[in-house]
Image (spheres, helix red, strand yellow):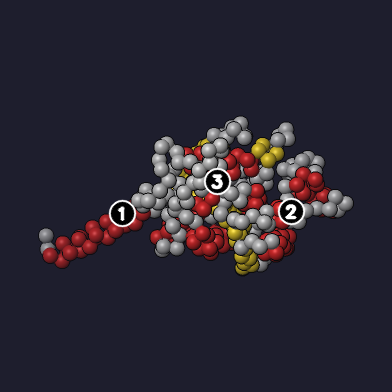
Amino acid sequence: MPQRMFAVLCRSLLCGAGMIGAAQAHGIVERHLTAPSAALGHAIPYSLYKPAAAPAAGTRWPVLYLLHGGGGGDQDWLDYGKIAATLDDEIAAGKLPPLVVVMPDGGGESWFVDNTDAGGAGKVETALSTDLVEAIDTTLPTAACRSGRAVGGLSMGGYGATLFALDHPDRFVAAISLSGAIAEPIDPDDAVRIKKGDEYYDGAFGKPFDVERYNAANVFPRVDKDAELPDKPSFWITAGDRDGLGIITGSAELHVALRRAGYDTTLRIGAGQHDWTNWAQSIVPALDWLAPQLRDSCPPMRSTAAAGPALGQSEPKGGEAQK
């Protein structure tokens, strides 16, 4: 073989080997997965991103639970948000630690709340914040504690992420709200907002719309309720400057309420609308903000003779020790 041709062939083979190595470094995407749920009485569909390589010795994977918007499903972040490519780039650049991202199906228009009405989505919040977390920590080598978990979402999922973090500060160290559909409680005499609620929330808070149920599930009262907690979740809140005025206002009001209550909270209003172009871009700085807060191991568990482990600090599964 002529020397020049041999050199070209060698370069081609080396290039091919590099490409193969890069492909092997990409995360693994799994669709059509399910987790058992006693709260729902049926399985939870979810999609998954996980690193290709096992956790480094002495570490475990942190987990981000990423929620979809209204009418969406568990594959939206993969198909429309291109989240797998974003995670690959962030991890390869060293901006994000290798982590698991769980994308559950929250039942379309559930608003990620518990709703046991006939025809309702069921106990969605309980299922996703308890049953799904337990299933993930059981089946994967995760950092099964508060410092290894975060939750995020867009639009309706931004509301859900905020709700989960405030309801379960022992399970989630941080929350991300992208264009979160967040609003203050409704005055029971405000006929205009109640009428809009009947149209907007699609039965998630009763049909007809029950203002008392809505206010009971509202995130704003929870901010003050949890203000004295020593370990409060931190929040990244963002909206596009061409988003709906209610989205921008609700995001800003939540940020102010959180700050007044002593939470670590960040607000960003950037260029964009209420669409996937915005969310696919705005998730990147959110992940950069999240990265230093996640831990790849759990602190030693405090021994209590009478009580078993809380979900926020799970016992190792299958005899494995938390490293």
Label 2: how many Cα within 10 Å (few below 14, some 14–19, many 20+): some
Upstream in sequence: badge 3 or badge 1:
1
Say which residue appears at 62% left-offset and 34% top-offset.
40
Mark 2 vs 1: CB contact within 8 A: no
Residue 253 shows up from this direction: yes
Label 3: how many Cα within 10 Å (few below 14, some 14–19, many 20+): many
Upstream in sequence: badge 2 or badge 3:
2
The front one of 102 and 278 is 102
Residue position for label 3: 312
Q: Residue 311 location, x and y as percent? A: 55, 42
Q: CA distance from mark 3 to mark 1?
A: 39 Å
What kind of element bears circle 3? Answer: loop
Q: Amino acid at mark 3?
A: Gly
Residue position for label 2: 221
Q: Residue 172 location, x and y as percent? A: 57, 51
Viewer-nearest of discs 3 and 1: 3
Say which residue appears at 66% left-offset and 62% top-offset.
262
Mark 3 vs 1: CB contact within 8 A: no
Viewer-nearest of discs 2 and 1: 2
Q: Residue 312 location, x and y as percent? A: 55, 46
Q: Amino acid at mark 1?
A: Ile
Relative vertical location of residue 273 with respect to residue 80 in this rendering, above or below: below
What kind of element bears circle 2? Answer: helix
Upstream in sequence: badge 2 or badge 1:
1
List the single residue furthest toward the front.
Answer: 305
Residue 39: which disc?
none
Residue position for label 1: 20
Say which residue appears at 68% left-offset and 54% top-offset.
226
Relative vertical location of residue 32 with respect to residue 76 in this rendering, above or below: above
Q: Amino acid at mark 2?
A: Pro
What kind of element bears circle 1? Answer: helix
